[in-house]
Amino acid sequence: MIKLLACVCSIVVLSFISAGMPLAERIQPSVKVEAAQKKYWISSTGKTHNSSCRYYNNCKGYWSDTGSGNNCKICGGANK
């Protein structure tokens, strides 16, 4: 099982290398662009988090320009 996992990981890494662009450059710009365009992080529980929150982009969720109406009690969400 471990050999299979190592083989799969090697294939994934080699596919990124063969594409001519480092892995970090393929992933990071899209995340930075997405974050720059959106103001809030809506977690999978439906709570709105702003950039000062420990849960901002640190849990399952999605970006949004507007709050969900259910603000985080730690950071204040869209109310701050």
Image: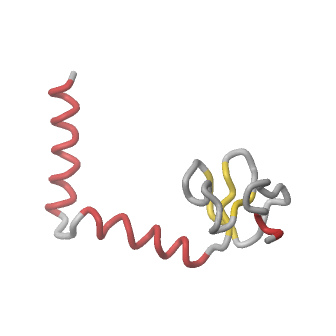
Q: Is 28 drawn above or below residue 11 in the view shown?
A: below
Quarter of the image with the N terminus in it: top left
Name the one closer to the observer, 15 or 62: 62
Q: Can you give x and y, in whole percent of width and height, for residue 32 in the image? A: 46, 73
Q: Is 33 drawn above or below residue 60 in the view shown?
A: below
Q: How is the image coloured?
A: secondary structure
Q: How many labels, in total?
A: 0
Q: Can you give x and y, in whole percent of width and height, for residue 56 in the image? A: 61, 60
Residue at the (76%, 70%) spot, across then down: 66
Left or right position of 17 against 40:
left
Left or right position of 63 against 27:
right
Q: Quadrant of residue 77?
A: bottom right
Residue at the top extreme, as displayed: 1
Left or right position of 59 against 43:
left
Name the one closer to the observer, 17 or 48: 48
Residue at the (79%, 62%) spot, across then down: 76
Q: Is 1 drawn above or below residue 20 in the view shown?
A: above
Quarter of the image with the C terminus in it: bottom right
Residue at the (29%, 65%) spot, across then down: 24
Q: Can you give x and y, in whole percent of width and height, for residue 41 in the image? A: 65, 61
Residue at the (63%, 68%) spot, across then down: 51
